[in-house]
Amino acid sequence: MSTVLIVVALIVVIAVAVAAVLYGTGKGGGRAGLKRRFGPEYERAVNRHHGDAKAAENELTERVRRHGDLSPRPLPAEARDQYVAHWAGLQERFVDSPRQAVVEADKLIARLASDRGFPDAGEHSQHIDALSVHHAHQVEGYRRVHHAASEAGHDASTEELREAMVQARQLFERLVLDSKEDSPRHRPGIPGRSAALRPKGSGV
């Protein structure tokens, strides 16, 4: 075999290896890739499978296979402003009606996620799975507020409701402001994120 053919063969082998690594990283990339991508969701999955890391990784890999190619839709500026105003109103309402505010927050996030192109909340497991693929570090707060809003969470204390609301706000902010279009905080006359989403006196 000539030197040229050997060099070409080596280049092909290296290119294939690099492509495999990049593909693996994009699709989860084994244990290390899944841990990087899912963070706290990885540990949650392992705990749910009673410490069986392989079973947890299979589940997370399946989530990526199903939802990894989902491309969230940007929100129109008007819709985004309405969502921000609605959330600010819920935080103010929390002072007098914490449970009702949490119930409405759960519905608002579900509707927002649907508007961004995530699976409808009617299929809650798929809804959460898809969100976990794209917002692994924020989705737990949404789980908490959904649980608190359900019958199973009817005994939650005001402090537990407040904590759920605060944590759920992280996902809300990512969904409502994580867009290529100009966000409210970048447009004249629209309050910034802190002012719009965290009114004084609400506690949330």
Image (tube, helix red, strand yellow):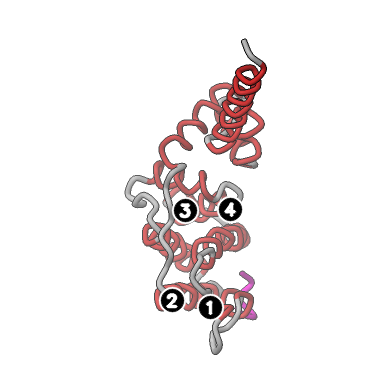
User: Does the CB distance between marks 1 and 2 fall below 8 Å?
Assistant: yes
Sequence-wise, the earlier of marks 3 and 1 is: 3
User: In whole angstroms, how far apart are the C-alphas of marks 3 and 4?
Assistant: 13 Å
Picture disc at residue 184: 1
Neighbourhood count class around disc 3 (C-alpha, 10 Å): few under 14, some 14–19, many 20 upward:
many
Q: Which residue is mark 4?
A: 138
Q: CA distance from mark 2 to mark 3?
A: 27 Å
**Could one spot residue 52 in this view of the protein?**
no
Q: Circle 2 sits on which residue?
A: 77
Report the span colored magenta: 199-204
Q: Which residue in the protein does label 3 denote?
A: 146
Is tag 1's residue or tag 4's residue first in the polypeptide sequence?
Answer: 4
**Secondary structure of the magenta portion, mostly?**
loop
* Residue pictured at 48% horizontal, 78% vertical: 85
> Which badge, 2 or 3, comes first in the chain's sequence?
2
Residue 58 drawn at (x, y percent): 51, 26
